[in-house]
Image (cartoon, rainbow, N blue to C red):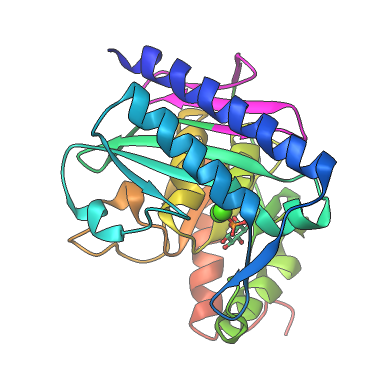
């Protein structure tokens, strides 16, 4: 089966999963629980994870899967061969509160290299997709990232981890970004933030996230012409395509300025107007 056929199946699965998410919102009778102290998870996250896993197993028997809720074993990242990387609901807090930034994210990596991805946002009517080397699409139409040239004219998205004790250094970064850029957005779904960089709704995005949050979106952004990378070197035992710490994804011309700004913030550097 070629990558286009595989992507078509992944898109169908993501869209069916999106229908389940939309149905669950209409019915409003799902339970809310917590993973650890602060991370919200609903029974819909788990049900959709199970549905996607069953569908992938039926279409691609015995290909490995890394899924946020039911198969989150990251040791699979170090193994070769095909790996499906799935976030059943990216934007769980948005989902639970009734916001629209919610997405299903499915990617395929082979030997650690992203090959294809789909991000489907059921409440926005947006299906983003990409195949490595073939460009990116939104609802079947080719997309390209923005032509932003300067930080002052750039809209930048980011996010924060559930663990509140890990947020302080990120506030330092944010302080520099709000001073230097047009404005910021915290939309609550990393996969969609990346796709919105891909389609020019955002000029850049930075965050530390898990493989399921970013795998599909990263490929889609890259295929739309965005510059993708990390603020610090990746560990040697993990493929860079599946490493989510300190991700930076932007319109090409602002990658270096934003990289420098965030590194300066991390180093405790002064704000420009101080
Ligand atoms: C979260 C979202 C959010 C990001 C968090 C992720 P979830 O994923 O992508 O935007 O800031 O780091 O954990 O929990 O809604 O799947
Ligand atoms: Ca997620
Ligand atoms: Ca999730």
Residue appearing at x 57%, y 79% in the figure: 163
Residue appearing at x 43%, y 29% in the figure: 55
Is residue 182 placed above or below 121 in the rendered structure?
below
Image location (x, y in percent) of residue 225: 50, 31
Left/right placement of residue 252 relative to residue 108 reads right
Q: Is residue 40 magenta?
A: no
Is residue 110 placed above or below 16 in the rendered structure?
below
The reply to whether residue 268 is visible in this rendering is yes
Image location (x, y in percent) of residue 170: 60, 76
Left/right placement of residue 147 relative to residue 109 reads right
Q: Quarter of the image for the C terminus: give it.
A: bottom right
Image location (x, y in percent) of residue 62: 23, 34
Q: Is residue 121 magenta?
A: yes
In this view of the protein, which residue sits in the foreground, 259 or 187?
A: 187
Q: Quarter of the image for the N terminus: give it.
A: top left
Image location (x, y in percent) of residue 197: 62, 40
The reply to whether residue 146 is visible in this rendering is no
Residue appearing at x 48%, y 36% in the figure: 52
Q: What are the residue bounds of the magenta stretch? A: 119-142
In this view of the protein, which residue sits in the foreground, 127 or 171?
A: 127
């Amino acid at each position: 089966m070629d990558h286009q056929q595989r992507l078509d199946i992944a898109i169908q699965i993501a869209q069916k999963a999106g229908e389940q998410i939309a149905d669950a919102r209409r019915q409003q009778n799902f339970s809310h629980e917590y993973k650890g102290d602060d991370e919200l998870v609903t029974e819909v996250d788990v049900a959709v994870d199970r549905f996607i896993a069953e569908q992938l197993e039926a279409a691609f028997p015995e290909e490995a899967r890394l899924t946020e809720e039911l198969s989150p074993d990251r040791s699979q990242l170090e193994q070769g061969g095909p790996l499906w990387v799935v976030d059943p609901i990216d934007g769980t807090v948005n989902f639970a509160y009734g916001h629209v930034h919610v997405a299903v994210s499915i990617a395929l990596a082979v030997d650690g290299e992203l090959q294809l991805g789909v991000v489907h946002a059921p409440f926005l009517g947006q299906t983003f997709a990409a195949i490595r080397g073939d460009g990116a699409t939104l609802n079947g139409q080719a997309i390209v990232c923005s032509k932003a040239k300067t930080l002052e004219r750039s809209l930048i998205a980011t996010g924060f981890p559930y663990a509140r004790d890990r947020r302080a250094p990120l506030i330092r970064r944010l302080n520099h970004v709000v001073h230097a850029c047009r404005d910021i957005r915290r939309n609550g779904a990393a996969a969609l933030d990346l796709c919105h960089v891909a389609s020019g709704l955002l000029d850049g995005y930075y965050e530390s996230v898990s493989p399921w949050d970013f795998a599909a979106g990263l490929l889609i952004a890259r295929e739309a012409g965005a510059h993708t990378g990390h603020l610090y070197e990746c560990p040697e035992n993990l493929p860079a395509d599946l490493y989510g710490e300190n991700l930076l994804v932007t319109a090409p011309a602002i990658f270096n300025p934003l990289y420098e700004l965030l590194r300066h913030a991390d180093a405790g550097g002064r704000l420009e107007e101080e």
